[in-house]
Amino acid sequence: PVIGLMIGVRARPRYFIARGVLRFGRGLAALVLGPAGAVAVDLRPSGGRRELAAGVRLLAAGERLVVFPEGWAHMDGRHGTFKRGAAYMAARAARRRGSPISIVPLHLHYPRHPGAWMTRVRPSMQYFLTAIGFWRYRRGVTAVIGPPISTETLPASWDEATPVLEARSRARAPSRL
């Protein structure tokens, strides 16, 4: 879906994607998504510092950056908790630029999901099964774009800003079917 979204954007954005996704198909996903602007992100609790610094630099330079704040696509249809990275990068970049950053929430809603059984298999297998069953699980997607959220309207602390950003982003998201 990100590639489809990039068609309507004048300047092609960069986007963060979980390193595990790029390893899908023995690196085949990286060959496809890398040239499209993907940046691999380490989702381990102690990882991701370099990627966050890169995100701050991109945003401070005025680049567009797509971030999936849950960190991972949940194949069972549930919403994951937002990680702090999006709020952190936006706040740091705004401070570095000396002007606010606008965050445009985009919720991708898939009407059908494999189900809870999918969470019992390795993430690489989840993506494989979803890829071969795309006709069933990845069609009919609805993209809901919310109004921009300025860093000026968020709490200064990214720990406090993250739940506010999550609540505002989910306010227009369709409920699970």
Image (spheres, rainbow, N blue to C red):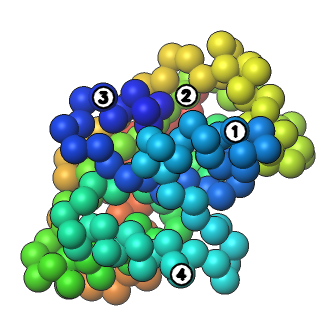
Kindly identify which residue carries mark 1.
28
Q: Residue at x 56, y 17 (%)?
A: 139
Identified by mark 2, the residue type is: Tyr
Q: Position of residue 100 (x, y in %)?
A: 14, 72
Q: Which residue is mark 3?
A: 7
CA distance for labels 2 and 1: 24 Å
Instruction: Give the label, 1 or 3, closer to the camera.
Output: 1
Q: Amino acid at mark 1?
A: Leu
Q: Earlier in the sequence, mark 1 or mark 3?
A: 3
Tag of residue 50: none
Q: Residue at x 71, y 26 (%)?
A: 131
In this image, 91 relative to 34: left or right? left
Distance from the alpha carbon under mark 2 to that under mark 3: 20 Å
Residue 23 sits above or below residue 129 on the image: below
Report helix, strand or loop for mark 3.
Answer: loop
Kindly identify which numbered label has been placed on residue 49. Answer: 4
Give the mark, 2 or 4, whose residue is nearer the N terminus: 4
Of callouts 2 and 3, which one flags the residue occurring earlier in the amino acid sequence? 3
